[in-house]
Amino acid sequence: MSNLAPIRAQAHPATTALTGTIRVPGDKSISHRALMFAALAVGTSRITGLLEGEDVLRTAAAMRALGATITTDDSGVWSVTGLGLGALQTPDDVLDMGNSGTAARLLCGVLASHDLFAVMTGDASLRRRPMRRVIAPLAATGAVFAARPGDLLPLAVNGAAEAMPLTYRLPVASAQVKSALLLAGLNARGITSIEEPEPTRDHSENMLRHFGAHLTIEPLGSGRLIRLIGQPELNAADIAVPGDPSSAAFPIVAALLVAGSRITIEAVGLNPLRTGLFTTLQEMGAALSITNGRIEGGEPVGDITVTASNLRGVDVPAARAPSMIDEYPILAIACARASGPSRLRGLSELRVKESDRLSATLALLRANGAAVSLDGDDMVIEGGVNRLGGGAVETRMDHRLAMSALVLGLAADAPVQIDDARFIETSFPGFVPLMQGLGATIALAGAAA
Ligand code: S3P
């Protein structure tokens, strides 16, 4: 975090409609993967639209420390020159992955099948997040991991000199775990075979093909079986990163809730394994339409237009969770403003995000007058409350809680305050000015976020 002191922020109930045409920063998941895959390929890959948020900058720094050459120019194009699979070297210092679970977990996969030694750490939030889900299956490559009790960061790894391929059924639907195993399998001799119980975002699979790897994907029950042939020739390839649908979610929900609003967000990634929120909002009665659908860099992209709408409560099935796992805090805001009750099912994975998002979302809503409870792993939100807002929200080093609370403030009856806006920089640099440009009133106490 570049600013050492917390930056408080307050969002005021909107007095005018939100209007305009905008773009949101590049997709975080695709940006991490673009840097890692390009660093493992031979030659120079050019990446446009890369998310220049703190999380992704940590991945860039780590791949540099491991031997890749990574530069950026004034036009925002990133160039990554890799030396090929197996060529990464022992870094001189500890790899600090900041706030980013994706960076830390995917990098464990890269390190496991390289003959090197590395130590990894992160900020206080990341040092609380479980790493066992990646280091346990990755040990079968021959890599040796040593972590803090509880399988927490910091951890050290001696990567395998001759990595074994992996055969693994994921116990939880997690694209991070799947991607870590695929990254390890890339430099293992033989076929790495992964079963996932539910389909999760497939950006790694798309990008592996883009760089020339051979993999097959078959349906298996309600999930998928993915098989990757190890040690392919990975050749440099250019990548255009689409706008992040998980970032687009915030202005979209704000525009749905603020009377009279109409906004368009151009070039948003629309991978069907990421669009559960948009389906859910449409079920709630949102006027949300997609135009100009196209494929860019192997991923579906389109422009999203939303108009303020009267939303109804919704029942979201657990099976939809992987396609909107990061969107529950902002969906909960929409549900609090909807008429009628909502039930969001099967949210146990929210407990291990940047914060315990299940308890943090509950606290956020309760502090602002919403009626919300937990029923096992389901969140139940009453909706239809007349007066919302006026609360102070602890954001717990979690960017998505910070943005969700500010959106609530725009759509509430009294201002909503957050204790720290700095973590927004991890995924959505420029969020506050972008929202101000649409007509929102958000005040920062201290430096600009
Ligand atoms: C991500 C996968 C998801 C998501 C995270 C990004 C990825 O995590 O929450 O923000 O890029 O693979 P899980 O794999 O833990 O579900």
Image (spheres, rainbow, N blue to C red):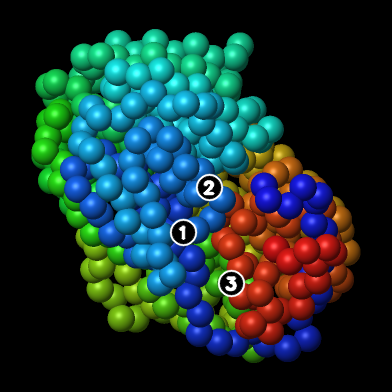
Callout 3: helix, strand or loop? helix
Crowding at mark 1 (Cα within 10 Å: few <14, some 14-19, many 20+): many
In the rendered view, tell whether residue 412 sits above or below residue 307.
Answer: above
Q: Is residue 303 visible?
A: yes
Tell me which residue sits at (56%, 50%) in the image: 54
Q: CA distance from mark 1 to mark 2?
A: 9 Å
Q: Is residue 385 visible?
A: no
Which quadrant of the figure has residue 26?
Answer: bottom left
The kind of residue on which mark 3 rests is: Pro
Q: Quadrant of the C terminus?
A: bottom right
**Residues marked 1 and 2 touching at CB (< 8 Å):** yes
Nearer to us of marks 3 and 1 is: 1
Tell me which label, 3 or 1, sits earlier in the chain: 1
The residue indicated by pointer 1 is 51
The residue indicated by pointer 3 is 251
Q: Is residue 148 left or right of residue 86?
A: right
Q: Is residue 317 left or right of residue 380?
A: left
**Residues marked 3 and 1 touching at CB (< 8 Å):** no
The kind of residue on which mark 1 rests is: Leu
For this rendering, which residue is in front, 229 or 143? 143
Count of numbered circles on the image? 3
Q: Residue 138: where, in percent of width, then height? A: 35, 19
Tell me which residue sits at (68%, 84%) in the image: 439
Q: Is residue 201 left or right of residue 51?
A: left
Tell me which residue sits at (47%, 42%) in the image: 61
In the rendered view, tell whether residue 35 sits above or below residue 94.
Answer: below
Q: CA distance from mark 2 to mark 3?
A: 21 Å
The residue indicated by pointer 2 is 55
Label 2 CB-ligand 1 distance < 8 A: no
